[in-house]
Image (spheres, rainbow, N blue to C red):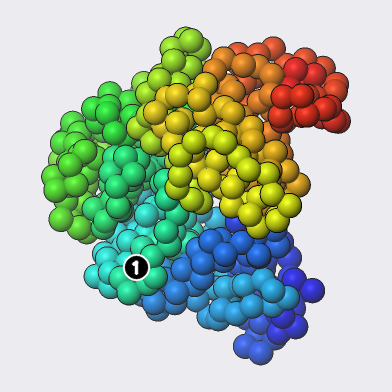
Amino acid sequence: MVLPKRYLSPTLVARGGMAEVYRATDSVLGRTVAVKVLAERHAREPEIRERFAREARAAAQLSGIRHVITVFDVGEHGGRPFIVMEYLDGGTLHDRLRNGRIEPGQALEWLDQAAHALDQAHARGVVHRDVKPANLLLDGDANVHVTDFGIASAGGFDTLTLPGTVLGTAGYLSPEQASGEPATSSSDLYALGVVAFELLTGRRPYLSETAATEAFAHVTAPVPSATRIDESLPVALDAVFGDALAKDPAARPRDAADLVARLHDALADSPAPTVIGAPAASRKTLHQMRRPRRAVYVLAAAVLLAAGIALAAALGVARDAGGSGTEASPSSDPAAARAEAARLNDVGFTRMQAGEYEAALPALVRAVELLRGTGTQTEAFARYNLAYTRFALGHCTGVLTPLDRSEAIQGYRAEIGELRSEWQLRCAPPPPETAVDDGPGRGKGKGKHKND
């Protein structure tokens, strides 16, 4: 049984790379609850268990704050940690955005509520680090509740040390996070500014084909004009977003309430009311925004990973151990083999960051070979690194097999889907047939793709 006997009639409502969420009835208190359970494949992974425990501690510390999800219980059942929270049935802001921009009055109400929750968390020393529409849940009365403090940084909590990790989601990642620097409360303000931009215009400010290019734009690109995207918006909004999305954290508003107050003022200065549901005048589809493929690949290969963000933007890549060199010493000791594989993955990732893909490839091939069949998070990361490196080198073969296996281990991630889409754009997908295995000369196995 997935849940303790106390929680009756569990129904799976969501599944991610890290956890599963069930709706259940608390038989003791007679109420519907949401129970988040660490995925079984991660239950024996110390770093993932620690991240999950971090979420429980952060959420418990903030439980009871208005517009923050309420936590009722934490525990462990069958070797799998779980968190019991209030169940909200209104969906998320991400769900609402699927239909485009939000009417400004409603957007401001939701932003006010999210700002209250974030400012209260910051006052208690907690930085969320992954503010985005999918983490802004709605109750039956359409009020926002901030959830998922799974990668939060909280004062007094043990540090979760994952070298080379950038935590957050690419579309909402502050420049400092994308550059690998520590997140602060100002980083959450930046992400809230991105959410506000998306609510009011119907699209993210740096919408790109891949998470890598989008994360890099947060670091280097000027703040786009909201009023050029939607001409019905007041020009005063551009100055507000210019501050909210400033590259320098010190130039941003002093807190979330200040940011939303400035949005209120800018919208109040609008010469005419914005029509509810009016389409963005200059909105472009992703297809329309595509640049020539060759330019995208050069940018990804030569710049993005050199900035240290291409892989880590939403996968939360963990380079388990430092080291240099690519020589692996095969060992009959499984623990030693995993440690060596982690070191090689670290070497490969470091060389990827420097744009040295040819040098990264042998280390990653060997890392995958040593980790084959372990089903660990490190294997998933190494396989993704291998797939990305081969693709960055211009290869069509040897990309989809490690990518598919990475997804089989850790579940779907946006970056996996995006890399697969980029592969399809460059490499004409052949009919299903035998696939070449991960390492050169390692033999063949069943697979989905002839050229992979």
In the image, taking residue 219 as reference, residue 94 lies left or right, namely right
Determine crowd level at label 1: few under 14, some 14-19, many 20+ residues with C-alpha closer than 10 A: many
Q: Which residue is mark 1?
A: 154
Q: Is residue 390 above or below residue 12?
A: above
Q: Nearer the viewer, residue 226 or 375?
A: 375
Q: Is residue 268 above or below residue 287?
A: below
Q: Position of residue 264 (x, y in %)?
A: 21, 49
Q: Position of residue 105 (x, y in %)?
A: 32, 49
Asked whether the viewer can see residue 55, the reply is yes
Q: Is residue 321 above or below residue 326?
A: below
Q: Nearer the viewer, residue 187 or 366?
A: 366
Q: Position of residue 373 (x, y in %)?
A: 76, 47
In the image, taking residue 444 as reference, residue 353 lies left or right, namely left
* Position of the N terminus by quadrant: bottom right
Q: Position of residue 242 (x, y in %)?
A: 19, 36
Q: Residue furthest bottom?
A: 28
Q: Nearer the viewer, residue 417 or 342?
A: 342
The secondary structure type at the circle numbered 1 is strand
Q: Residue at x 61, y 72 (%)?
A: 82
In the image, taking residue 276 as reference, residue 373 lies left or right, namely right
Q: Quadrant of residue 416?
A: top right
Q: Quadrant of residue 438?
A: top right
Q: Residue at x 48, y 17 (%)?
A: 297
Q: Amino acid at mark 1?
A: Ala
* Position of the C terminus by quadrant: top right
Q: Residue at x 73, y 43 (%)?
A: 372
Please tell me how many numbered marks the rendered image carries.
1
Asked whether the viewer can see residue 200, the reply is no
Q: Residue at x 32, y 74 (%)?
A: 156
